[in-house]
Image (tube, rainbow, N blue to C red):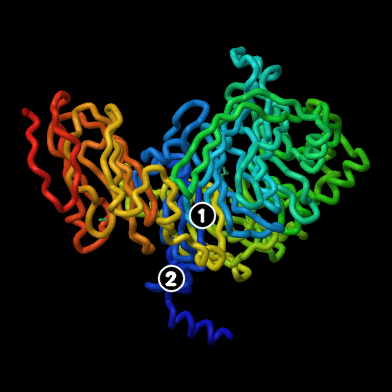
């Protein structure tokens, strides 16, 4: 054995050097290598943080496939800029073109990924979005009333019955006078948890009910599953109800709480008419795949359950030191709570929680809600796991993996014995981590991805702002192994990963032109035209390799609002056309095969304005262009349009 080792050392010198990060990574590079023309094993759907978008990477390669615009305008494809998609970003505060996106939840059936939708949160102006995983486009956005800082969301129940959102900041309720002294926090500020139902066929979201809670701050949470299906576990901090210098004042108490919500019970109370109707204002935005157009509707009421009217619906479990995340293991029995400042990780037992409730093993109340005795709910603690535990994912083989922000590492531990089994460094300051299927009842395992907060010295420097980054680990063996660093776009927070086989065969390739129900669609070049309605000029335009119809437009006058309704006539996969015109001060648009999109453009001066296709679509892409003539306000140039024919010349000074 010694001989073999010595031989191996001689042969592979670097594998016997002390394990630096570099050697660990290069040693396993082949495991993350996806050869040209080969597909990745997983889609990794990653939050974009302050870019308000969601991005999609391949695992194990770390290659970036797509940036899905969700809560921010996208210059890449005109989302939020085109007339059709602007309503997606409408809110009760008006048009909000940029938000902060932190968490992802993939739809589930029986606790397992079903590959239908991804849900995403907007943190700042509280909203939930649903992304269709056949188009990788945002299908729906729902604003959340009575919320401020929609950080604790979205979390999904076992059959996607609900996506759930809890408020980060407690505030006075939307229908109350909010003009109160900030130091009246304890009297006037309330928390809120929203249960948003998901239509099992269409995916349509609707706020089924809200639960009014004490004025704590909510953080990451999980639905129960398996035996704990019907329950929800929210981490909460600031049980001190501090309203200033939270870094000190919200860390006074030794323990905050995990709030256990019996949502099946809440449903019963709702049915029994216990909820009160509250008038509020929130936007509901839906993208219609047939008209290729979004609509925004303002809604004005929610149903609210008050725990005072609903006994046995809420319980609190003490949890050390400002918990940031609560995670439920694949069996649904163990609830792992991570206190940002705690020196251990408490693991609660669902069975024990139920017994404690039955035995009334309570330690008094907090705002009228029973507090279960810590020891009565506890399965045990992971002792000395590292510093700053944040989030835990599972491999389905009985192990938990917890990210440690302060000590920059991931710790693997055994759920039943609570023994630490392994630890690996992350570079640096890991926030979330993701194991494919990690939050489900059936993790796919194999890999683990770390999403880091600091990258200093890992990549070529790019001025004051460095790239954001993720790291890929192999978790198929007993020891975790670092395979790859890959940069990400935006700040990655939470992410989920799903097997490629669940999504790749059901991708939408084109929109059928005959199904295009856009009111300004031109389903053939013969339908193109230009029409004036007052100072609005509507251009019914088509795009097909390699010309735009019409490509000569005259008779537009200074001050006119010109609407280019461009229909892409292609019926082939991967042949979008773009449209841009000089001076456009919103954006360009990108139109998928069979789709119609509209760019609004205002004629601000006399002259000739070229327009062209912005997507290199064919050998004659550079020829895919045209001209628009703008005449003075009082000119009598008639509206003319054509492609391939020269109309008789008209002078504007006649
Ligand atoms: S949080 S780093 Cu925005 Cu998800 Cu825990
Ligand atoms: Cu169409 Cu370039």
Mark in the foreground, 1 or 2: 1
Q: Quadrant of the N terminus?
A: bottom right
Seen at 24% across and 29% down, the residue is: 560
Q: Is residue 68 above or below residue 150?
A: below
Q: Is residue 428 above or below residue 498?
A: above
Instruction: Give SS at disc 1.
Output: strand
Seen at 43% across and 71% down, the residue is: 34
Image coordinates for residue 273, horizontal then vertical, percent: 81, 31
Image coordinates for residue 510, horizontal then vertical, percent: 42, 59
Quadrant of residue 588 in the image? top left
Ligand 1 lies under 8 Å from the Cβ of mark 1: no
Residue at numbered disc 2: 33
Instruction: Give SS at disc 2.
Output: loop
* Left or right: 564 as drawn, with respect to 333: left
Image coordinates for residue 343, horizontal then vertical, percent: 67, 45
Question: Does any portion of residue 129 appear in the rendered image?
Answer: yes
Camera-side residue of 630 and 367? 630
Question: Does any portion of residue 340 appear in the rendered image?
Answer: no
Image coordinates for residue 155, horizontal then vertical, percent: 64, 46
Residue at numbered disc 1: 45
Q: Quadrant of the C terminus?
A: top left
Seen at 18% across and 40% down, the residue is: 640
Seen at 22% across and 31% down, the residue is: 603
């Amino acid at each position: 054995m010694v001989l073999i080792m010595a031989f191996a050392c001689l042969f592979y010198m670097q594998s016997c050097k002390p394990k630096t990060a570099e050697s660990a990574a290069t040693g396993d590079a082949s495991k993350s290598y996806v050869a040209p023309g080969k597909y990745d094993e997983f889609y990794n759907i990653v939050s974009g943080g302050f870019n308000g978008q969601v991005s999609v990477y391949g695992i194990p390669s770390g290659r970036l496939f797509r940036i899905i615009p969700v809560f921010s305008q996208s210059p890449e494809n005109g989302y939020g800029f085109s007339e059709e998609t602007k309503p997606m970003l409408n809110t009760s505060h008006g048009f909000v073109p940029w938000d902060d996106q932190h968490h992802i939840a993939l739809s589930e059936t029986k606790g397992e990924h079903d590959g239908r939708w991804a849900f995403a949160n907007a943190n700042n102006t509280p909203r939930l979005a649903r992304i269709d995983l056949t188009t990788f486009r945002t299908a729906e956005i729902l604003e959340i009333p009575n919320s401020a800082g929609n950080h604790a969301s979205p979390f999904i129940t076992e059959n996607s019955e609900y996506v759930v959102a809890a408020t980060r900041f407690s505030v006075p309720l939307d229908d109350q006078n909010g003009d109160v002294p900030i130091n009246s926090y304890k009297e006037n500020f309330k928390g809120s948890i929203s249960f948003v139902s998901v239509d099992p066929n269409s995916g349509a979201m609707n706020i089924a009910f809200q639960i009014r809670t004490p004025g704590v701050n909510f953080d990451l949470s999980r639905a129960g599953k398996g035996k704990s299906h019907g329950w929800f576990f929210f981490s909460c901090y600031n049980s001190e109800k501090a309203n200033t210098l939270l870094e000190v004042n919200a860390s006074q108490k030794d323990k905050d709480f995990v709030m256990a919500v019996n949502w099946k019970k809440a449903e019963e109370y709702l049915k029994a008419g216990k909820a009160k109707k509250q008038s509020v204002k929130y936007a509901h935005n839906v993208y219609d795949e047939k008209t290729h157009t979004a609509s925004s509707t303002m809604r004005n009421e929610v149903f609210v359950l008050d725990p005072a009217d609903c006994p046995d619906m809420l319980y609190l479990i003490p949890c050390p030191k400002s918990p940031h995340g609560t995670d439920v293991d694949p069996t649904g029995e163990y609830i792992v709570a991570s206190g940002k400042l705690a020196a251990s990780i408490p693991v609660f037992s669902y069975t024990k929680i139920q017994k404690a409730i039955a035995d009334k093993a309570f330690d008094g109340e907090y705002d009228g809600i029973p507090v279960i005795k810590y020891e009565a709910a506890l399965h045990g603690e992971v002792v000395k796991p590292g510093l700053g535990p944040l989030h835990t994912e599972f491999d389905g083989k009985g192990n938990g993996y917890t990210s440690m922000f302060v000590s920059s590492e991931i710790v693997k531990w055994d759920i039943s014995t609570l023994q630490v089994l392994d630890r690996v460094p992350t570079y640096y300051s890991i926030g979330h981590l993701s194991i494919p299927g990690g939050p489900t009842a059936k993790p796919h395992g194999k890999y683990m991805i770390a999403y880091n907060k600091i990258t200093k010295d890992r990549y070529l420097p790019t001025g004051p702002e460095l790239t954001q980054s993720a790291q890929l680990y192999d978790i198929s063996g007993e020891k975790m192994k670092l395979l790859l660093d890959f940069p990400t776009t935006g700040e990655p927070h939470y992410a989920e990963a799903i097997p490629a086989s669940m999504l790749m065969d059901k991708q939408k390739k084109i929109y059928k032109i005959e199904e295009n129900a856009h009111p300004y669609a031109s389903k053939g070049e013969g339908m193109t035209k230009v029409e004036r309605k007052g100072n609005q000029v509507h251009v019914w335009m088509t795009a097909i390799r390699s010309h735009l119809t019409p490509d000569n437009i005259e008779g537009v006058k200074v001050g006119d609002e010109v609407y280019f309704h461009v229909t892409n006539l292609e019926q082939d996969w991967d042949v979008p056309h773009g449209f841009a015109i000089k001076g456009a001060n919103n954006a360009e648009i990108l139109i998928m095969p069979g789709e119609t999109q509209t760019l609004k453009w205002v004629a601000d001066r006399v002259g000739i304005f070229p327009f062209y296709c912005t997507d290199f679509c064919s050998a004659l892409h550079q020829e895919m262009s045209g001209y628009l003539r703008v005449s003075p306000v009082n000119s009598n140039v008639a509206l003319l349009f054509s492609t391939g024919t020269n109309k008789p010349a008209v002078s504007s000074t006649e």
